[in-house]
Amino acid sequence: MSAEKIKQLRLQRAWSQEQLAEAAGVSVRTVQRVENGATPGLETLKALAAVYDVTVDELRGVAEPTTDSAQAEPVMDPKHQEKTDMNSTPSTANPELQSDQAREDQKEFYKMAARFTFILIFLLIVNLATSPYLWVQWPALGMGLALVSRAATVFGVWGSKRERGDS
């Protein structure tokens, strides 16, 4: 595995380690370790290969690319590259990264739902203790609409977060 090759590909695109880490869905520390010669796991190699549009074998240094596409490729912002990968056909997009991102989005949704639930319970207690008028319904309505909107996005009714281009 050529740590120098991974660093060279990153520098050709004028990306920082942070940009590469974000585009590949790995931590900055992982990128630093790989560039310093640590042996990455297969999933890390697959993620980096997908970002660089090369094979895992090419990253490992087993096979040389048949074309000079890495040097001829225009410099592209990692976020744009990520959006392109996610909007490409299933055969070219990395399904492991998509499913990891989907699981992460769902996890964040459930955290958001739990926070809203605790906030609304707290507001209901305050409302019942301080006022005969049930004003807690208005924050509940607003939070409920936000939660439904987020659920529709995360679970695919309006398209995934990445397809819309949000960061």
Image (cartoon, rainbow, N blue to C red):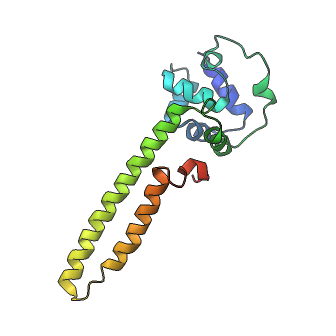
Q: How many marks?
A: 0
In the rendered image, the residue lying farthest to the right is 72
Q: Position of residue 122 (x, y in %)?
A: 24, 71
In the rendered image, the residue lying farthest to the left is 129
Answer left or right for 2 relative to 106. right
Q: Quadrant of residue 147?
A: bottom left
Q: Position of residue 132 (x, y in %)?
A: 21, 89
Residue at the image position 38 percent from the left and 47 percent from the top:
107
Residue at the image position 65 percent from the left and 17 percent from the top:
58
Residue 14, relative to residue 152: is it above or below?
Answer: above
Q: Quadrant of residue 7?
A: top right
Q: Position of residue 73 (x, y in %)?
A: 78, 32
Residue 92, relative to residue 101: is it above or below?
Answer: above
The N terminus sits in image quarter: top right
Residue at the image position 46 percent from the left and 62 percent from the top:
149
Answer left or right for 72 relative to 101. right
88 vs 39, nearest the viewer: 88
In the rendered image, the residue lying farthest to the front is 157
Answer left or right for 42 relative to 129. right
